Image (cartoon, helix red, strand yellow):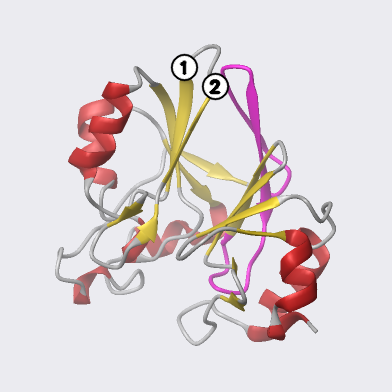
Amino acid sequence: MAAGIYAANCYIVYSENTKDGIIVDPGGDSDEILDVINERDINIDYIILTHGHGDHIGGVISLINKLKVPLLIHEEDVDMISDANMNLSNIMPSGPVELKPDRLLKDGDIIKFGDLEAEIIHTPGHTKGGISIKIGDNLITGDTLFQGSIGRTDLIGGDYDTIISSIKEKLLIFPDYTIVWPGHGAESTVGSEKRNNPFLR
């Protein structure tokens, strides 16, 4: 679901068998997120952030207060989410957000929830601590890779060469049928991005 004024994609991923799940990038609209969780009787184990920008974190405080679950982010974005100037939430209509994570992630970490596993892939370039999350044949790519585009690299911690390397060396290695779920916009596949993304030719 697209959450918050900037329509960042928020993902609620859960096991059909155990109903254990995670929330990825709750950028806002926490009441709507809670409605989905309650309607489907999901037990949320973690909130995971793909990076620390304000448009992806706006709903975190409200959700943590209600769900009492740990907040996870890559270790290289911890300074960003704790500083409203760095994460740009200070210039957003929803107001400044400063967060303290409960667990710092590293490349290769495995987060288990129910009978599912989320593999953490460090994909810097949009921010220093940007991650993608692989769950089965699905890749949640945050603001690293979009349908037909890539994340911007002109903000704090951004670097064009780094984001291109992250995508080519860490994401495009997966089978073409792997579904790409980006931080904004529609889903794609690894194969489609290999063939059609002008930034990756």
**Compared with residue 12, is residue 159 higher up or lower down, i.e. above or below?**
below
Residue occupied by mark 1: 19
Residue at 70% x, 84% y is 199
Rendered location of residue 16, percent (x, y): 53, 18
41, 52: nearer the viewer: 41
Query: Which amino acid type is shown beneath numbered disc 2?
Result: Ser
Judge whether residue 121 is colored magenta: yes
CB under 8 Å between callouts 2 and 1? yes
Rendered location of residue 152, percent (x, y): 52, 81
User: Splitting the image into 4 quarters, where does residue 144 fall?
Assistant: bottom right
Q: In the drawing, does residue 32 fall left or right of residue 55?
A: left
| Labelled disc at residue 15 | 2
Residue at 21% x, 29% y is 66
Which range is magenta? 107-130
Q: Report the quarter where the C terminus lies.
A: bottom right
**Compared with residue 84, is residue 105 higher up or lower down, i.e. above or below?**
above
Residue at 35% x, 21% y is 40
Mark 1 nearby-residue class (10 Å; few <14, some 14–19, many ≥20): some
